[in-house]
């Protein structure tokens, strides 16, 4: 099969991709990754990204799902160029609003003998499946069924006029080899003998199935590349045949089918159940269904959108280097379908946390302040953005989530009222109380309480007295923090200031009886 070479030069005027979810509930992170790869591809080639809602299965519609999907992308910073809620010249972009368009193309296939009416009831089909092992509605069985191929035109018309429910099936002729091309997997050869006559249209809701709707929509919306999940790869031969049936072969898009996201164990597709069992989300945002069922979201669990994006991008795509941290622009610049894996990508919850921690560590004090202030207020702490950011900045290297910061920094804002028993037993005995009294006098005599000056004076005193640095610092830590954790002691003293430092030392001296 001769294939035209796709070039970046040609791409600028022709690349149009789409993300077309069904509003059947919360958006799985596998769907988010599909949207992300479409977005990266579109931006890299200066193309357009279309947002389409595929709601042809009216029985599975869930109220609130569409807005949930849109809100997810707003949070993630994935921007669409046209589509539902964005406008554009190829609408409507919601399939349920395109009924009349689909009817025209269904009728075209019927008129040209490339499709046929089928009146078989669900009960009749079930009976056939019970009678025939591995039953399939195809060239071998269709002439035994109740359809327009086995009924006269008059009978068919009468059945339709009488309100008989029907579907329209695509007529697949056996004995042909279809060669389909996937940009990730290469050429795939399929015999039409194994294909069934797929349902294209249902009379009961006057809506097409995915197979017809996505072909018609992609054609009319000028979609150049279809990047979707690998679950649609088995349908690709049918879609090739449909493009041919409409006479659109020369205009059909190129296809790329992305590998599955796998369970952390590697066996099977990642599901909500896996997340519930192992304690991680599989949806971008918190979700509450109309029936009251809830599911965790990455946003509400404290993940940064840029960290979430970075993590997802590397699930199934390899940049070909050791680099792991990518900005959105770097992802756009480096992304290529050629480096997308053919095999499934195993999701690693700990790696997701690692990515979030990396982004935490690189945030400025100002960025951290904006995120940390609501948590401080929840604890009754009112401080300036400068102090909030400074506290967060000192401890950010130890944090994975913004929510970690309170436990890590609370001592900056609240003096200890209790003292860690293990730390006290080790450092609040013998000469340590007397040594702390001496240190208090040294600290009281310091006018410039900056970190550098305090460190210089205290270290000089320790050296002069011949004390153990570790012993002095850990005793001071007990007084100021109440435990054996926290940053360097001069970070603490410079933050809380001279007056508060002395007050906390006095509290320890007054309230905790030294051990033996």
Image (tube, rainbow, N blue to C red):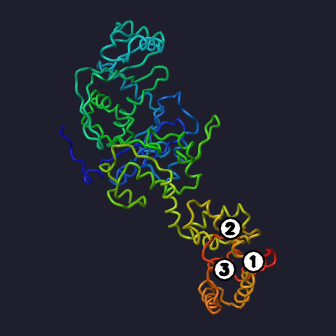
Q: Which residue is drawn at 59% across and 61% down?
A: 402
Whole-number angstrom distance, CA of label 2 to CA of label 1 = 14 Å
Q: What element carries label 1?
A: helix
In what quadrant of the picture does the N terminus appear? top left
> How dense is the environment of label 1, judged by Cα within 10 Å: few (below 14), some, or many (20 and up)?
many
Whole-number angstrom distance, CA of label 3 to CA of label 2 = 14 Å
Lower sequence index among marks 3 and 2:
2
Q: Which of labels 2 and 1 is toward the front?
A: 1
Q: Mark 3 points at which residue?
A: 493
Q: Mark 1 points at which residue?
A: 504
> How dense is the environment of label 2, judged by Cα within 10 Å: few (below 14), some, or many (20 and up)?
some
Q: Is residue 113 above or below residue 471?
A: above
Q: Is residue 221 left or right of residue 79?
A: left
Q: Which residue lies furthest to the bottom in this view?
A: 464
Which one is nearer the viewer's eye here, 340 or 91?
340
Q: Mark 2 points at which residue?
A: 410
Q: Is mark 3 on a helix, strand or loop?
A: helix
């Amino acid at each position: 099969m001769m294939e035209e070479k796709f070039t970046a030069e040609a791409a600028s005027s022709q690349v149009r991709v789409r993300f077309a979810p069904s509003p059947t509930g919360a958006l799985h992170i596998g769907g988010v990754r599909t949207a992300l790869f479409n977005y990266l591809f579109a931006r890299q080639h200066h193309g357009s990204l279309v947002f389409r809602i595929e709601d042809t299965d009216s029985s599975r519609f869930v109220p609130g799902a569409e807005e949930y999907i849109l809100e997810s992308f707003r949070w993630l910073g994935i921007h669409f160029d046209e589509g539902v809620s964005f406008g554009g010249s190829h609408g409507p972009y919601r399939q349920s609003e395109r009924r009349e368009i689909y009817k025209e193309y269904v009728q075209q296939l019927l008129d040209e003998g490339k499709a046929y009416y089928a009146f078989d009831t669900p009960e009749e089909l079930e009976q056939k499946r019970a009678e025939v092992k591995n039953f399939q509605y195809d060239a071998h069985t269709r002439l035994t069924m109740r359809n327009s191929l086995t009924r006269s035109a008059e009978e068919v018309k009468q059945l339709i006029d009488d309100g008989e429910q029907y579907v329209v099936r695509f007529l697949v002729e056996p004995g042909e080899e279809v060669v389909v091309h996937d940009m990730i997997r290469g050429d795939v050869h399929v015999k039409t003998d194994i294909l069934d006559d797929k349902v294209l249209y249902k009379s009961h809701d006057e809506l097409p199935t995915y197979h017809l709707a996505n072909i018609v929509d992609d054609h009319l919306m000028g979609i150049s590349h279809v990047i979707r999940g690998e679950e649609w790869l088995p349908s690709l031969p049918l879609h090739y045949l449909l493009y041919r049936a409409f006479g659109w072969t020369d205009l059909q898009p190129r296809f790329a089918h992305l590998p599955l996201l796998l369970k952390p164990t590697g066996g099977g597709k990642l599901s909500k159940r896996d997340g519930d069992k192992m304690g991680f989300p599989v949806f971008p945002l918190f979700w509450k269904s109309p029936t009251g069922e809830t599911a965790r979201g990455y946003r509400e669990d404290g993940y940064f959108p840029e960290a979430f994006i970075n993590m997802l991008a590397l699930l199934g795509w390899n940049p070909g280097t050791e680099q792991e941290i990518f900005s959105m622009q770097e992802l756009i610049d480096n992304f290529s379908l050629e480096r997308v894996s053919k095999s499934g990508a195993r999701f690693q919850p700990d790696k997701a946390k690692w990515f979030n921690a990396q982004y935490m560590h690189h945030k400025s004090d100002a960025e951290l302040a904006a995120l940390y202030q609501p948590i401080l207020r929840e604890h009754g702490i009112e401080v300036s953005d400068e102090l909030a950011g400074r506290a967060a900045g000192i401890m950010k290297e130890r944090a994975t989530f913004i929510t970690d910061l309170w436990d890590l920094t609370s001592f900056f804002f609240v003096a200890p009222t209790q003292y860690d028993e293990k730390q006290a037993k080790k450092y609040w005995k013998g000469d340590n109380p007397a040594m702390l009294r001496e240190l208090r006098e040294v600290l009281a005599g310091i006018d410039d309480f900056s970190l550098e000056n305090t460190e210089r004076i205290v270290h000089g005193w320790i050296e002069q007295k011949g004390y153990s640095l570790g012993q002095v610092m850990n005793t001071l830590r007990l007084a100021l923090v109440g435990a054996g954790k926290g940053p360097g002691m001069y970070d603490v003293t410079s933050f809380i200031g001279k007056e508060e430092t002395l007050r906390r030392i006095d509290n320890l001296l007054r309230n905790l009886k030294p051990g033996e």
